[in-house]
Image: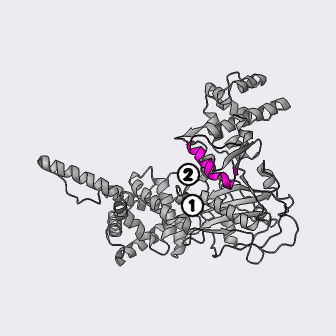
Amino acid sequence: MSAMSVPVALNSSMATSSSSSSSPSPSSSSLASSSTPGRGASESVPDVSAPVPSPRPTLGERLGQWFGRGKSGGQGGAPKDGKDGKGDGKIVAAPLSARAENALRRQLALCFSARLTDSSANEAAREFMARYGAASAEEQLALLTVVADICASDGEAGGDGKGTGKDGGKDASKDSAKDARRATNTATGLAGALGSARVRFLKRFNALPDGLPFLVGWRADMLHHRAALPGLAALEEDLGSLFSTWFDVGLLELHPITWDSPASLLEKLMRYEAVHEISSWADLRNRLDSDRRCYAFFHPRMSREPLIFVEVAFVPEMAADVHSLLDEKAPLEDLRRVRWAIFYSISNTQPGLRGVSFGNFLLKRVIDELHVDFPKLRNFATLSPIPGFNDWLRQLSAQALAEALGPKRVKLLAQEPSLATEASGAQMMAWLQASPDRKSGQALQRTLGEALAAHYLARETVRGQPRDPVARFHLGNGARVERINWHADLSKKGAKQSCGMMVNYLYEPDELDANLQRLIDGEPALGRAVSRLL
């Protein structure tokens, strides 16, 4: 299960794809070939329909290659932590000469002001897109700076540019007030939004053959530099609103990704995985085996780029830890007997689509697909991380921790000599991450850890929504918090995020609407095991 950059997608370190002599690397001739029984034997499933090029990490490299001006470099891609791939260091804009800046302003002004059918303006947009794609990060920031300045000065583009003098009198003031109200009403209406210069500017790029992927990458850059360039805010917000229409779920195509899919697509899967890092080709093959499924949404105009994908495992019972799901040596499950479909990873791939929600539609579409392939399959659940748990716990005072635990569990703290009577949240977190020698200490750890996780998921909210981003996503889809799993993810990342705990969210198709209403009413749906922990 993912975290959505939501937070989308959700934060994780970059998964690196390693190809060695001991790990099978897919190619056009080897992807489907396997005679070894057990995990690793492939099953024929329809491929993604479109061919996929080699992965191209950054916006600049992608566009540069499209226009024949690409730069050499290592692998990259849309980073899984929601950043735009430019690195953590600060970028200083490359200087532009006065002549170059004036020429750029004239070019952009034409793109802003001309009709959408104006061929010279469309050519100017095409040239700007090529220039931006071939530019270095510093040069791209310089171009963005000019765009931000133009957008900031164009804030009143809908007006006539005429002001009212000091001696205009009362009538002029009334006219000015009326004009202001009229401008506000127009700007907030659909006609005003669609007719704005900024929207026309963005639509001009979208009309170009490679314009949509350019805009997705460009918005990622805008989000990255928005704090330093506040003039970009309105343009970025307009683009986000347009994306909600351009990436409407009705336009997206659902395709399976299999071991027989093009190698370049599999490479992207390894890079984009945002929940559980794919460490090798063997690891990837395990996740695409006959008792697994992987589905992705594609846009017709970006058919070579998965927008979001989900990994599914078929198991005899609801999964309690991720290590068994990812065990490459585990035997294949008999698909005639499986009772559960577990969504164990959902990853957004495009930082530029932040705020465009289609993950909930993905899961529902996948459940429908699984019902077709496995008519007797009735149980659907996730095995999900709890990414915000440690950050929340670390900030709790001793009093807040006691309130979260409740009187009965606070008394249990006295049984643990390594914890102070009035332990803070930070002290509790450090203790939960430790490894007590005594069995009684281990049992107490589990009791208190699961109770705190249940409280965090069920009771901690921000603006009326679950505080945890993954909980917000699944509960917003109509799922139920079914079970807290102790030591379900003992990786370094799992310990850092949630003291190794994970959670199952249960998807019952007939209960989704009722569960969503419960969330709206402030009482998220909880399974019995979780309710007992509160």
Q: Nearer the viewer, mark 1 or mark 2?
A: 1
| Res. 74 visible in picture | yes
Q: Is residue 133 above or below residue 525?
A: below
Which mark is on residue 181?
none
**What percent of the width, then of the height, locates residue 524?**
62, 42
Magenta span: 506-523
Location of mark 2 (residue): 88
Q: What crowding class fits label 2: few (fewer than 14 Cα within 10 Å), some (14-19), or many (20 or more)?
A: few
Location of mark 1 (residue): 350
**Secondary structure that dominates the magenta span:** helix
**What percent of the width, then of the height, locates residue 8?**
58, 54
Residue 81 lies in the magenta stretch: no
Mark 1 residue type: Gln
Q: Is residue 499 above or below residue 510?
A: above
Q: CA distance from mark 1 to mark 2?
A: 18 Å
Q: Position of 421 compared to 317: left or right? A: left
Tell which circle, 1 or 2, labels the residue nearer the N-terminal end. Answer: 2
**What percent of the width, then of the height, locates residue 124?**
38, 73
Q: What crowding class fits label 1: few (fewer than 14 Cα within 10 Å), some (14-19), or many (20 or more)?
A: many
| Res. 438 visible in picture | no
Residue drawn where x is 78% and y is 51% of the image: 318
